[in-house]
C-alpha cells in the first residue's frame, strides 16, 4: 500500500490556492497542484457562483431537470412545515421521473 495519505481539497481550498498559488502553505502533492491548475476556471467559477464551499467534487447529476423539480417540490413542502422523510423523498423523485418520462415519450 501507499504510505502517503490521500489529500482532498474542497472548492474553497482550491480557490484560495488558485488565488495565492502558494504551494508550500497548503502542503499538497504535485499531482493535486497540477489538477487544480488544470481545472482553474471551473474551480473559480464554482466558488464565485456560491456553490457549497466544502464540496470536494464538482460533479453534476445525470438528470438535472428532475433534480431541480424535486428541489422545487421540496422547498414548497418545507414552506408548509410538512415533515419529510427519506421514503417520501424517494416517492416524490420517482413520481417526478415518471412524469418526465411520460412527457418525453
Image: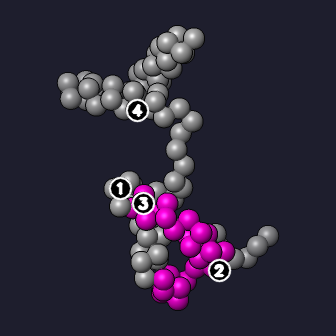
Q: Secondary structure at mark 4?
A: helix
Q: Are marks 4 and 2 in contact (CB under 8 Å)?
A: no
Q: Secondary structure at mark 2?
A: helix
Q: Secondary structure at mark 3?
A: helix
Q: Which residue is mark 2?
A: 30
**Are there few (<14), some (14-19), or many (20+) residues within 10 Å of tag 3?**
few
Looking at the picture, how far across and down is residue 72, in whole percent?
33, 29
Q: How far separated are the C-alphas under marks 4 and 2?
A: 37 Å
Q: Which residues are magenta?
A: 21-47
Q: Which residue is mark 4?
A: 68
- Residue 27 located within the stretch drawn in magenta: yes
Q: Which mark is residue 45?
A: 3
Q: Earlier in the sequence, mark 4 or mark 1?
A: 1
Residue 28 is drawn in which quadrant? bottom right
**Where is 89 relative to 18, above or below?**
above
Q: Which residue is mark 1?
A: 49
Q: How far separated are the C-alphas under marks 2 and 3?
A: 23 Å
6 left or right of 45 in image: right
Residue 7 is drawn in which quadrant? bottom right
**Are there few (<14), some (14-19), or many (20+) residues within 10 Å of tag 2?**
few
Q: Are marks 1 and 3 in contact (CB under 8 Å)?
A: yes
Q: Which mark is residue 29?
A: none
Q: How far separated are the C-alphas under marks 4 and 1?
A: 17 Å
Q: Secondary structure at mark 1?
A: loop
Report the coloring of the rendering: one colour
Q: Quadrant of the C terminus?
A: top right
**Where is 98 relative to 65, above or below?**
above
Looking at the picture, how far across and down is residue 104, in whole percent?
54, 15
Amino acid at each position: 500500500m501507499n504510505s502517503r495519505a490521500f489529500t482532498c481539497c474542497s472548492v474553497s481550498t482550491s480557490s484560495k490556492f488558485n488565488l495565492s498559488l502558494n504551494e508550500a502553505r497548503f502542503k499538497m502533492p504535485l499531482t493535486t497542484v497540477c489538477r487544480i491548475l488544470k481545472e482553474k476556471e471551473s474551480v473559480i467559477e464554482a466558488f464565485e457562483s456560491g456553490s457549497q464551499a466544502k464540496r470536494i467534487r464538482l460533479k453534476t447529476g445525470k438528470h438535472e431537470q428532475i433534480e431541480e423539480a424535486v428541489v422545487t417540490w421540496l422547498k414548497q413542502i418545507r414552506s408548509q412545515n410538512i415533515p419529510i422523510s427519506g421514503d417520501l423523498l424517494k416517492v416524490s423523485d420517482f413520481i417526478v421521473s415518471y412524469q418526465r418520462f411520460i412527457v418525453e415519450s
